[in-house]
């Protein structure tokens, strides 16, 4: 070990490290007890640096390569810096042997730039940050930056600032937490040129110790604004579902009503970004204890209220809380397709089976809560909900009715263990007829099952998927029948008795009901366009100077076209009636039989050890 004075230049450090072994022996002063205390000295901030003479062979060779790279770089040239960075990155990635002390090689400004670049490129390298990992392993500590009066300079860009801008990868929160521990000046809230602070980063990644440190060791500002987005630490904590961090910030005086650059208040964030259906209640209660009032009907820049976002995010309990807290339902407008279910799908689509049941139960539970409070769904709202089922494959088909025979026993055991409500197991529920399931299982039962109990169920995918689709069919059947009946009557021009239409609708699967809704909607739109077109094409009263023969010819041609149009429409309806009648007759004749596997005989399908999702007659 050698001790470097404060006046030593960086070139002197390079010279000492690269000197021959004989020269090093002349410069080194080692105490008798130095070898015994070597481990303690490495962690002490005493001005000593490690030199290559006391590293193993591999570490020495790699350090020499690093020093040569460092000596050649021109820090004023951006291209040269980037060339050095990638050379350094690959050297570290393949490093073997002991690790050097970066403090004796790079200045604090250089170290900030190198680590920030490594963080910036992490999402491009599958979340790998070899330089940061290497620095942490070497015991590197950030000692801060000071002005001439020995005051800490808080205006600086650090690797933690860059962490707030990279795409998320699984190890990022742990990496950020470890980086916070390298800052010796605990509680110094460094801020970059955009107003992003270390407190923002700590709130975003759930670093509760760091958050508390900012308020314990310094006068932290809980409402500091990141000018780039207008977000406060509270916005970022809620967007990342860090409930404890949000409560920490509120306890230190964070304003729960500040809006970001998009006009989003913390309550908007809870209803759009947060998948915790209980977070809103917790947030309201904490604000009540601190006597803070929340803006329940605040609108963002797109004129969306928290209630609209909660509906679009399928959070029925949050909808209930907002209505209890005075959200205005009289001026409520149902979410449009541009954001209806958008955030929900982005969160859950990777877990397909869980996603399907949660979506079906969530959207219908939200609609049910709104209607119980007095909101009247219109046809466009219902069609938007139905469209979600079609878009995400929630309809039952003949291909997804059955459970593979070899998985029956395992599936049945698990299904009997799971309770869908207090009186029915999953095994019993999937064998109920639709009218029976409507009596014994509520939408809330399905929602709670999808939210909590389904996570405890782990049957093979071949068994899980048909069961989830069947549950989606059962819980939504009443809703589909209710809205399809009126549309079906319109499609038939009320030429069939309502009792007959109701009987036909009752026998069809949800996919068929959706097709009827589509046909009726298209027919209505076509009729409307035809009326508008006819109004434009209808011949106006001609002046007397116009030839009567010409006028009669034009009128006759229009009548011919109109007759053809009406005839085609009647033919279409007749074909539709015949198809529906044949399908209804087929169901009445064969609906009482159990659904059979194509590869199995009738005798085999009657065996009691074979379980089918959706065996009742209505299929």
Image: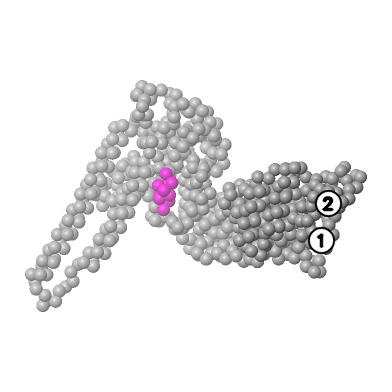
Q: How is the image coloured?
A: one colour
Residue 594 on the magenta segment: no
Residue 403: percent from left, percent from top? 44, 31
Circle 1 Cα neighbour tier, 10 Å, few/some/many (<14 / 14–19 / ≥20): few
Q: Position of residue 317 (x, y in %)?
A: 55, 50
Say what secondary structure mark 1 lies in: loop
Magenta residues span 384-393
Residue at image mark 2: 23
Location of residue 135 with respect to 508 vertically, above or below: below
The majority secondary structure of the magenta stretch comes to helix
Residue that mark 1 sits on: 8
Residue at the image position 11 percent from the left and 70 percent from the top: 551
Query: In the rendered view, does 268 fall on the left or right side of 528?
Result: right
Residue 566 is drawn in which quadrant? bottom left
51 in relation to 229, above or below: above
Q: For the view shown, which residue lies furthest in the left direction?
A: 549
Look at the image and tell me in which quarter the C terminus lies: top left
């Amino acid at each position: 070990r050698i001790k470097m004075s404060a006046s030593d230049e960086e070139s002197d450090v390079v010279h000492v490290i690269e000197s021959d072994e004989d020269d090093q022996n002349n410069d080194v002063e080692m105490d008798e007890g130095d070898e015994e205390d070597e481990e303690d000295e490495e962690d002490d901030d005493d001005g000593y640096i490690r030199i290559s003479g006391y590293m193993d062979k591999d570490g020495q060779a790699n350090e020499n390569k690093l020093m040569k790279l460092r000596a050649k770089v021109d820090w004023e040239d951006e291209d040269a810096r980037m060339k050095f960075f990638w050379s350094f990155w690959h050297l570290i990635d393949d490093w073997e042997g002991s690790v050097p002390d970066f403090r004796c090689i790079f200045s604090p400004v250089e170290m900030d730039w190198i680590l920030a670049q490594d963080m910036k490129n992490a999402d491009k390298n599958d979340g790998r940050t070899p330089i940061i990992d290497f620095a942490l392993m070497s015991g590197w500590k950030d000692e801060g930056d000071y002005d001439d009066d020995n005051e800490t300079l808080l205006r600086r860009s650090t690797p933690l600032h860059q962490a707030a801008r990279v795409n998320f990868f699984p190890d990022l929160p742990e990496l950020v937490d470890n980086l916070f521990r390298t800052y010796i000046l605990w509680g110094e809230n460094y801020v970059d040129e955009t107003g992003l602070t270390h407190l923002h980063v700590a709130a975003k990644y759930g670093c509760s110790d760091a958050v508390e440190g900012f308020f314990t060791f310094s006068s932290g500002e809980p409402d500091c604004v990141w000018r780039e987005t207008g977000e406060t630490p509270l916005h970022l904590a809620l967007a990342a579902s860090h409930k404890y961090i949000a409560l920490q910030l509120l306890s230190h005086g964070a304003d729960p009503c500040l809006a970001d650059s998009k006009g989003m208040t913390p309550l908007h964030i809870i209803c759009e970004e947060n998948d915790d259906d209980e977070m809103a209640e917790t947030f309201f209660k904490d604000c009540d204890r601190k006597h803070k009032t929340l803006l329940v009907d605040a609108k963002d820049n797109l004129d969306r209220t928290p209630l609209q976002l909660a509906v679009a995010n399928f959070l029925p309990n949050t909808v209930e809380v907002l209505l209890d807290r005075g959200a205005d339902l009289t001026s409520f407008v149902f979410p449009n397709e541009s954001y209806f279910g958008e955030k929900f799908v982005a969160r859950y689509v990777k877990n397909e089976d869980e996603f399907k049941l949660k979506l079906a139960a969530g959207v219908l539970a939200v609609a049910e809560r709104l209607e119980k409070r007095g909101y009247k769904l219109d046809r466009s709202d219902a069609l938007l909900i139905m469209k979600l089922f079609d878009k995400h494959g929630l309809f039952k088909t003949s291909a997804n009715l059955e459970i593979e025979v070899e998985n029956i026993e395992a599936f049945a055991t698990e299904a009997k263990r799971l309770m869908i409500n207090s009186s029915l197991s999953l095994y019993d529920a999937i064998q109920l007829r639709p009218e029976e399931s409507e009596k014994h299982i509520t939408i809330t039962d399905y929602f709670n099952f999808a939210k909590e109990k389904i996570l405890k169920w782990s049957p093979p995918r071949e068994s899980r998927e048909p069961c989830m689709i069947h549950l989606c069919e059962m819980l939504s059947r009443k809703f589909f029948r209710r809205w399809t009946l009126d549309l079906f009557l319109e499609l038939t021009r009320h030429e069939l008795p309502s009792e007959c239409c109701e009987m036909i609708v009752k026998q069809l699967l949800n996919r068929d009901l959706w097709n009827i809704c589509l046909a009726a909607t298209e027919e209505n739109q076509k009729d409307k366009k035809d009326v508008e077109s006819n109004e434009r094409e209808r011949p106006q009263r001609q002046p007397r100077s116009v030839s009567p023969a010409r006028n009669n010819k034009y009128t006759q041609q229009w009548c011919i076209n109109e007759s053809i149009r009406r005839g085609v429409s009647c033919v279409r309806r007749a074909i539709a009636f015949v198809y529906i009648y044949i399908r209804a007759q087929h169901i009445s004749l064969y609906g009482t039989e159990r659904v059979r596997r194509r590869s199995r005989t009738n005798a085999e399908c009657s065996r009691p050890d074979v379980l089918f999702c959706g065996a009742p007659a209505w299929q």
